[in-house]
Image (cartoon, grey):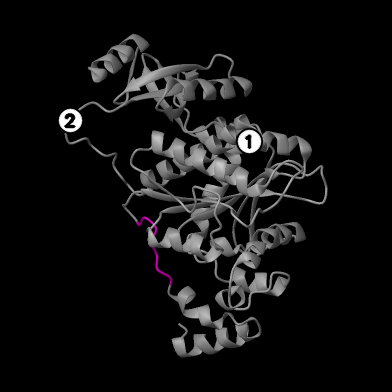
Amino acid sequence: MLMLANIVPFFKCRFRKIGLFIFVFSFLFPTVSLAQKGSKISTIVIDAGHGGKDPGASGKHSHEKDITLKVALKLGHYISENLKDVKVIYTRKTDVFIPLYKRAEIANDHHADVFISIHCNSNPSTRAYGAESYVIGLYKTKDNLMVAQKENEAIMYEDNAKERYGGFDLNSPQSYINLSLFQNLHLKQSLQLAHDIESEFKSYAHRKARGVYQAGFLVLWQTTMPSVLVELGFLTNPKEEAYLLSNKGQSQLAYSIYLAFKKFKTNFERENNVKPAVQSSGAPQKLEYRVQFYASSSEIRNTGKRFKGVAEVSYYKSARYFKYTAGHFSTVSEAVKYRNVLRGKGYKDAFVVVFLNGKRISFTEARKFQSQKQH
């Protein structure tokens, strides 16, 4: 086991050229604020990239800062409406400039369990399109490095950036290699969330999912929880720019990220043996809508493989059959949207069903229950 006396000279020598030694202790002993074993994911920080004097990437008719803000607010709305036990915090809710270090600081100060930074991409080629998700780490291609360089250019709008980021050089590959040494302690969980987001972009929004990558993003650098940077698409592609500017496109992308976050939260809490909250009043829980898409006379053990690309698969037993459902929605409209997605995947007979306290009921019973609640 290395003694501290041996570690410090190593890092001091390693980073002397770019002046990062002043940050060594903050990375050797980070403050871990992630929901730990047996606890819940209860706080998310949503970061709308760029803002104010920093427009970010630009298309012929758009600025990155405007699209990221609209998608961030929609994402927060979906989470607040459907996951009542999650507190949503934004790094910005208006067109203002927030330094990169401050965004991570907001997440850390609020003891967030998840951090999602939303961005839009650009490329010299107008043919490039599709969504990408990133976690901090060592870049593997020049394209990955270029994405990080473009997003990190935000520090050019900051005062005293050279001192604050330890002499970090935007154009030096070595700076990015050094930055990758300080990977988030929750890399595995960050990668899982990123993969969930890419999966939902493809299955729900029907967008091209370009994949999950690693690179040195300063906005993720000092976060102490699972952290993902999402590139929604390319503003330099005219067709994709039009989609990103549309309310439909922004809503689909935001809802895709919401579905991924919900899946990540559900799986995390299930793995850590978190029991659903019980209402102290003893009142029935809210209605839950799902999409029934398959039935079998025997239980399917590996639903992930059998129903690849279908979100949140579960089943209930009725008579002699195991009936498989997808999703857990709080409104009929959300369930109908996903029903249409599944029908597009070949499940032509998919339909919406409703549950109360885990038991399937009829829509007549559901309407009666809602009527009683209103009175």
As drawn, 274 above or below 19 = above
Q: Residue at x 45, y 37 (%)?
A: 77
As drawn, 14 above or below 353 = below
* Residue 357, position as x, y percentages in the image: 29, 26
- Name the side, left or right, on which 105 lies relative to 132: left
Q: How many marks?
A: 2
The residue closer to the viewer here, 74 or 138, is 74
Q: CA distance from mark 1 to mark 2?
A: 40 Å
In the picture of the structure, the residue carrying the numbered disc 2 is: 282
The residue closer to the viewer here, 192 or 340, is 340
For mark 1, does the 10 Å Cα neighbourhood hold few (<14), some (14 to 19), or many (20 or more) residues? some
As drawn, 302 above or below 148 = above
Asked if one can make out residue 3 in the rendered structure from this viewpoint, the answer is no
The residue stretch that appears in magenta: 30-36
In the picture of the structure, the residue carrying the numbered disc 1 is: 202
Q: Residue at x 59, y 46 (%)?
A: 68
